[in-house]
Amino acid sequence: MSANRTEVIELTRRLVSIPSHDDETAAGDAVESWLRAETDAEVTRDRHGNVVARRGEGTSLALVGHHDVVDPDGSQVVGPAGDDTAGRAAVEGEVDDESGPAGPDVEYLVEERDGRLYGRGTADMKGSLAAAMLAFRDADPAGELVFASFVGEERGGVGARAAIDDGVAPDYAVVGEGSTNYAGEDQTDVVVAHRGRRGSTLTASGTAAHASEPEAGENAVYRACDAVDVVRDLDAPDATVLGERVQGSLVVTEIDGGSAWNVVPERCTVTVDERTVPGERARLEAVESIDGVEWTVDQDLPPMACDDEGFADAALAAAAASQAATPEQVTKPHATDAGWLAEAGTTCVVCGAAEPGEAHTASESVSIDALGRCYEIYRTLATTFQRGSKP
């Protein structure tokens, strides 16, 4: 059995219509019930809300996605009867604070036009999730085929991390985040590495004094500025994965200090955003060479590097067989759940229908042709790729 264009569209529409920015339960219910009805796989739903299905034996290949989304724009919400009352109310600021623009009596709007599906989650990433579900159903797997849809990806990968802690550890994985139109127009490429994100705070402490006698205090803002100079002199991280360069970045994004115009500030904080690369980090600990400055890490989303050239090549071959264009192996600037899986020992690539600039926007959309390509890529790879046990 092979999915047709109508099936891909209908399943995407069904998943996208279900609100899942505050509570992923209903979306997880839909994924779980579809898998139980459409496949003979072993389907589980863990206590966190993750949905995992398995069939076949041997080396495991997972098709991985997530069913949570970021908050919708007001224009992406409709009422239960199909009107746009809730959407208009959200735009006009008339929504009840308790329910928000997508409360229990509303759905997400899904529209089809010009060969694309529009709505919150179409690109990130319920469209690719639908393609993976259909491919999971239709593939004749060469080994064990796993499907996993996680919760909380938009909250730092909490679902993936919990599943990994509970023992979900496939040998290989294709994570369905965006890789379309990275190397060329109208093509779906294969990501072999992506950046992570390390968010840090520099806290400068001083001693307050009256501004008329600044020498009586220690100015925390000055110390923070000295720490910023250290950050500016640091090199951003850089790495090469399977011949592809991954360039990180390092930038100060916020600064906050002082309590009044006539008081020498005793505290100042600086936020630093670092986009990390596989195996390399900026030497941010150097800021602690400044008196009174402390460095703390607030968030650390891991980067991903595919550690098996054979798997990357197999994914590229499946991508090439599924489209007229010539796809390429590329890198991605954004962190995904592939980082957590790779950190746990899973060999990953990223391949999905979303294009640069589509996710998290009021006009979010996905190409229906790209969804069809992803279905074929996932099904082909699941059918053709098999390796022995990983070392």
Image (cartoon, grey):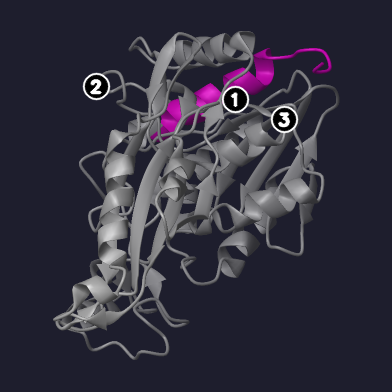
Looking at the image, do the residues carrying marks 1 and 2 touch, with CB atoms under 8 Å apart?
Answer: no
Tag 2 or tag 1, which sits nearer the N-term? 2
Q: Quadrant location of the C terminus?
A: top right
- Rendered view: 99 above or below 173: below
For the residue marked with disc 2, what is the amino acid?
Answer: Glu
* Magenta-tinted stretch: 371-391
Q: Nearer the viewer, mark 2 or mark 3?
A: 3
Distance (Cα) linking label 3 and label 1? 23 Å
> Where does the image place residue 121, in percent across and percent down from the top left?
40, 54
Is the stretch drawn in magenta largely helix, strand or loop? helix
Task: For label 2, count other residues whose C-alpha is less than 10 Å away and answer few (under 14), some (14-19) or many (20+).
Answer: few
Residue named by callout 3: 345
Looking at the image, do the residues carrying marks 2 and 3 touch, with CB atoms under 8 Å apart?
Answer: no
Q: Is residue 76 visible?
A: no
For the residue marked with disc 3, what is the amino acid?
Answer: Gly
Question: Please, what secondary structure does the residue beneath circle 2 have?
Answer: loop
Tag 1 or tag 3, which sits nearer the N-term? 3
Q: Quadrant location of the N terminus?
A: top right
Q: Is residue 176 visible?
A: yes
| Numbered badge on residue 185 | 2
Comparing 120 with 35, the one in front is: 120
Residue named by callout 1: 379
Is 53 positioned to the left or the right of 84 in the image? Answer: right
